[in-house]
Image (spheres, grey):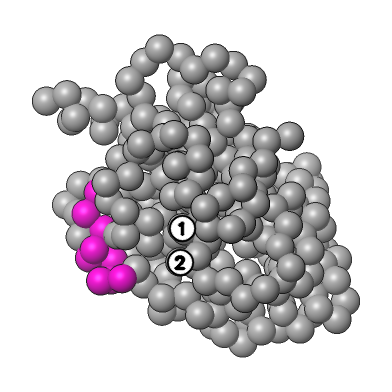
Amino acid sequence: MPYASLSTGHRIHYHDTTQSEPERGNDRPPIIMIHGLGSSQNFYMPVIPYLSDYRCVALDSYGAARSKSQGEPLTIEELAEDVVALLDHLHIERAVVVGHSMGGTMVHVIAAAHPERVVGVVSIGPVNPSSVKPEVFQTRIDTVLQDGMEALANTVPTSATAAASTPLQRALIRELILNQDPKAYASHCKAIIDMKEPSGGFEAVKVPALILAGEEDKSAPLEGCRYIYDHLGTDDRELSVMGGVGHWHCIEAGEQVAKEIDFFCVELQKRRKL
């Protein structure tokens, strides 16, 4: 199982498609994938098979799933620096950075702080920091520290998905949540409570950007996605609304997400060759 001991001091687990299949001889950019709260690299497993022409690296953020922490305080900026450190570890100079939910906010933090490492960003249901309701996440913190993860595992898979989501999709989400350590999950909730826009605001994001919004997403509603879109500092940006999709986009509509990412990357390559 591949672990990386990073320059940040964190040890994380990741999945790299070049370890199971030789890297293809093309000039398509590598894709690094960041999950959201209560999730893991497995969030992207319904997507990766449709992106077989790319090197895809999906990680467990520090404190999630197999990337064990002590439940110590963390910030979105620290978790974002782990992603850059993983690029260094894997000798990847530049990548398309994809993130979901709080990971969707992290991709903008990375692009603002390290534009030289980012070909483009794809944010899937990104959380708008100004719309975060601290009391909601404080309730989650209190719940998991007192009772463990099961209470959330029994409610989130239904409340945060679209009406048409299947029992199998909800079962996978439940398993992702149950696999979290309560103290580490609480640490991530606190990071969301304290979340801020990238240094310099979303206007500091100058790289090409795609935002994928779920039509039925209550956790990162369209209004917040539009706010981020309107404030990005690049004219090369797109907002795509996915019909009949809630907050767990890659599980609810993996093939559709993959097509969006592939089209974005192909267009990036076309422009780079002009």
Residue that appears at 62% across and 62% down: 37
Mark 2 lies on a secondary structure that is: helix
Q: Quadrant of residue 232?
A: bottom left
Type of amino acid under label 2: Glu
Type of amino acid under label 1: Glu
Residue identifier under label 2: 77
Q: Nearer the viewer, residue 119 or 221?
A: 119
Q: Is residue 42 above or below residue 80?
A: above
Name the quarter where the C terminus is drawn.
top left
* In magenta segment, residue 253: no
Q: Which mark is residue 268?
A: none
x then y, percent, for residue 52: 52, 21
* In magenta segment, residue 205: yes
Q: Is residue 180 above or below residue 74?
A: above
Q: Residues within 10 Å of mark 2 (few under 14, many from 20)?
A: some
Q: Nearer the viewer, residue 69 or 189?
A: 69
- What segment carries the magenta color? 199-207
Mark 1 lies on a secondary structure that is: helix
Q: Is residue 97 above or below residue 109?
A: above
Q: Main secondary structure of the magenta part?
A: loop
x then y, percent, for residue 262: 40, 30
Indicate left or right for 213 with 165 as reference. left
Could one spot residue 232 in this view of the protein?
Answer: no
Indicate left or right for 249 with 262 as reference. right
Is the residue under label 1 in contact with that under label 2 (CB below 8 Å)? yes
Residue identifier under label 1: 81
Q: Nearer the viewer, residue 138 or 225?
A: 138
Q: Residues within 10 Å of mark 1 (few under 14, many from 20)?
A: many
Residue that appears at 41% across and 45% down: 97
x then y, percent, for residue 168: 78, 42
Residue that appears at 64% across and 20% down: 20
Name the quarter where the N terminus is drawn.
top right
